[in-house]
Amino acid sequence: MWPNSILVLTVFLISSTLVTGGGVKGDKEKGVCPPDNVRCIREEDPLCYSDSDCGDQQICCFWHCGFKCVQPVKDIENTKV
């Protein structure tokens, strides 16, 4: 039973990292996705799939429960939430 528990915990940690790690992506020259601290009960349908789906000044980010075109931020460390 012990090895199964470790396996379940490992899979859970990896999947949660993949889900939360998608918050900051995009073209580094444009900037990065702004922080999104909204907790979602249900995800919305995506309005974009990549930065090329957005205008020149926007990037595709997971924002308020779904992928949307948003204004990037230059430095995520200095962005106030």
Image (cartoon, rainbow, N blue to C red):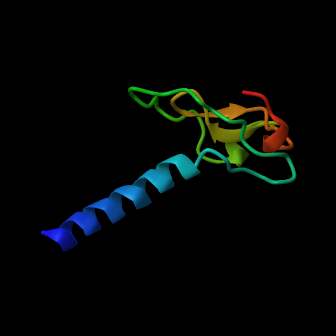
Compared to 44, does 5 lie above or below? below
Position of 73 with respect to 40 (left or right) is right
Question: Percent x, y for residue 24?
Answer: 67, 47
Q: Which residue lies furthest to the left in this view?
A: 1
- In-front residue for pair 65/45: 65
Quarter of the picture containing the N terminus is bottom left
Residue at x 49%, y 55% (from the top left corner): 18
Q: Quadrant of residue 43?
A: top left
Residue at x 59%, y 30% (from the top left corner): 37
Residue at x 76%, y 45% (from the top left corner): 32
**Count of numbered tags:** 0
Question: Percent x, y for residue 45?
Answer: 46, 32
Q: In which quarter of the image is residue 42?
A: top left
- In-front residue for pair 23/8: 8
Residue at x 55%, y 26% (from the top left corner): 38
Quarter of the picture containing the C terminus is top right
Question: Percent x, y for residue 20?
Answer: 53, 47
Q: Residue furthest bottom?
A: 3
- In-front residue for pair 80/24: 80
Q: Which residue lies furthest to the front in this view?
A: 2
Question: Percent x, y for residue 60?
Answer: 67, 41
Compared to 37, does 14 lie above or below? below
